[in-house]
Image (cartoon, rainbow, N blue to C red):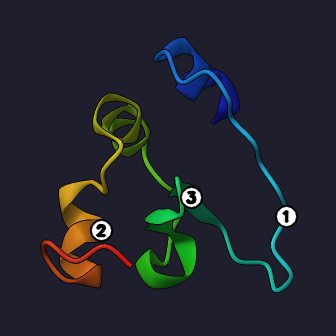
Amino acid sequence: MRVRLQQQGVGDVTMAPGTSGQFDVTADGALLYSKHLMGRFPMDREIDHWARTGEPEAAFAKVIGAGRRP
């Protein structure tokens, strides 16, 4: 995932393990994706969307509430 984001032009990608097996993606403190909430790892199109927009992809936005950023 780090390589894919860097190929999309995202310069500084940091990955850190969670304490309870969660897989969350955040940017500037905003939650872009949560494996815990979605029940799966992100797809390539979702990764591409974050890189382009810095916003959650539509399917995840629905889960956390449209227009609401945690």
User: Relative to the observer, which residue lies in front, 43 or 30?
Assistant: 30
User: Relative to the observer, which residue lies in front, 48 or 68?
Assistant: 68
- Residue at left offset 49%, top offset 78%: 39
The image shows residue 70 at horizontal and vertical percentages of 39, 79
Name the mark on residue 60.
Answer: 2
Alpha carbon separation for disc pair 2 and 3 = 11 Å
Quarter of the N terminus within the rendering: top right
Q: What residue type is labelled 3?
A: Val
- Residue at left offset 70%, top offset 77%: 22
The image shows residue 46 at horizontal and vertical percentages of 36, 45
The image shows residue 59 at horizontal and vertical percentages of 22, 65
Of the residues under marks 1 and 3, which one precedes in the sequence? 1
The local secondary structure at tag 3 comes to strand
Q: Mark 1 — residue?
A: 17
Q: What residue type is labelled 2?
A: Phe
Alpha carbon separation for disc pair 2 and 1 = 21 Å
Quarter-of-image position of residue 68: bottom left
Q: Mark 3 — residue?
A: 25
Q: Is residue 40 left or right of residue 14?
A: left
Of the residues under marks 2 and 3, which one precedes in the sequence? 3
Quarter-of-image position of residue 13: top right
Query: Eyeballing the image, is 66 above or below 9?
Result: below
The image shows residue 6 at horizontal and vertical percentages of 60, 19
Q: In this view, does 21 lie to the left or right of 48?
A: right
